[in-house]
Amino acid sequence: MKAVILAAGEGTRLRPFTNSEPKPMIPIANRPILEYAIEALAKNGVTDITMVVGYKKERIMSHFEDGKRWKVDIDYIDQKKRVAQAGTAYALSMAKSAVKGDFLVLPGDNIISPSLIGDLLGKKGKYRMVVTESETPSKYGVVELSGDTVKNIVEKPETHISNLISTGIYMFSDDIFGEIDRVMKSGKYGLTSVLQNIIPTTKVTAVKTSKVWSDVVYPWDILGMNALALRKCASKTSGKMDRGVTMKGPVSIGKGTIIRSGTHIMGPVVIGEGCEIGPSVCIYPSTSIGNNVRIGPFTIVENSILMNDVQLSSGSYISHSVIGEGAEILPQFCAVESEAHVRLEGECRKVDRLGALVGERTVIGSQVSVEPGCIIGSECRIANHVCVRGNVADNTRIM
């Protein structure tokens, strides 16, 4: 069985975290999102993988190479056009020459459980689509069923139809490429349009699932996906812990990491390699800390992601926040969580619980507070004693 993974997207709605990383390489529980899809395939014996790449493709290709580390064989196809014709149907069309017979299609930006892939493989039908319930169906293609047959699919409907959505995970026959060609000639480039053309004449089987599946659309979705991935965090201690460190629940600590005395960690938490944490730091559940991170004394971090090389100084408090790679934060930083209204793509979106979203290589001075829902871009410089409100563009200086 062949699988095609679509990993060419730019992820503009996830900025600033996709400024230098493609969306599938965003770290979730200290692993790129794309790893979860590859492992789900491998555990079901699907080892022949073609990956359609585009934006920042070198980051993906240098990490996964030929796939041997994951016991799969990966080849790459470059989706060269990235503007008007960058829909999912166009991306899949790039793999036409690499596919024969039946094959799987997966997004490269989803966490997918192996059992979900097993359910898809175990179902019958020439065309199959994995569907699931969503609390926010308007972000996706909403599906209407008759039994196990897809009768309609509407992309991002403005009015409520149902809570059942397409996950973007399919099994197709290679004759789908003829349908793709016909739809693209009419100026449509999404797989939803292709399926809408097929549905009246061909059975598309719905594979309902409540298994682990998650994707990211907006920056705050990274936190939900991280919390989901950490549910399977296993306790592992490879670093060094001073006396007086306490841990409860599953906590994974990487090689070369030092946890100083008085630090309390409540899992699920994952901490990477080469970190120095404490003394007297509290880390609470659903937190991922990358490699080479420094966290100063008397700091609290909960339900957050600190990416690689973050420097977080003493006396800080971070909750429900994402701190980008290489950010440097001076003492007494405060990012509390609350209900937030975030302005993105010209719209104001309500998020129930959110702290701060800070881009890579941003430097924040001492005694800075950030209002809930603020998005601070990459490579910004924020002076001491500032209260940050609203969104801050990349490379901004706040004095």
Image (cartoon, rainbow, N blue to C red):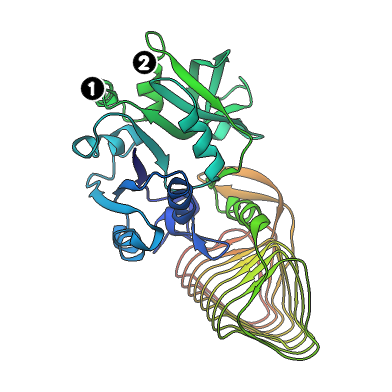
The image position of residue 76, as x and y in percent, is 25, 51
Contact (Cβ within 8 Å) of mark 2 with mark 1: no
Question: Which residue occupies 36% across, 44% down?
Answer: 5
**Quadrant of the image containing the C terminus:** bottom right
**Picture coordinates of residue 332 (x, y %)?**
72, 81
The picture places residue 351, in percent across and down from the top left corner, at 68, 47
Residue lying furthest left: 97
Depth check: 333 or 275 in front? 275
User: Could you say which quadrant of the image residue 3 lies in?
Assistant: top left
Task: Tell me, yes or no, if residue 229 can be seen here.
Answer: yes
Q: Secondary structure at mark 1?
A: helix
Of the image marks 2 and 1, the number of the one nearer the N terminus:
1
Residue drawn at 29 percent across, 43 percent down: 83
Q: Secondary structure at mark 2?
A: helix
Question: Real-space Cα distance between discs 2 and 1?
Answer: 11 Å
- Please determine whether, in this image, residue 368 is positioned above or below residue 354: below
Q: Which mark is residue 178?
A: 1
Q: Residue at x 41, y 14 (%)?
A: 199
Numbered badge on residue 214: none
**Residue 156 seen from this side:** no
Which amino acid, by three-letter code, is at mark 1?
Answer: Gly
Q: Amino acid at mark 2?
A: Ile
Quarter of the picture containing the N terminus is top left
Judge the density around disc 1: few (<14), some (14-19), many (≥20) Cα neighbours within 10 Å.
Answer: few
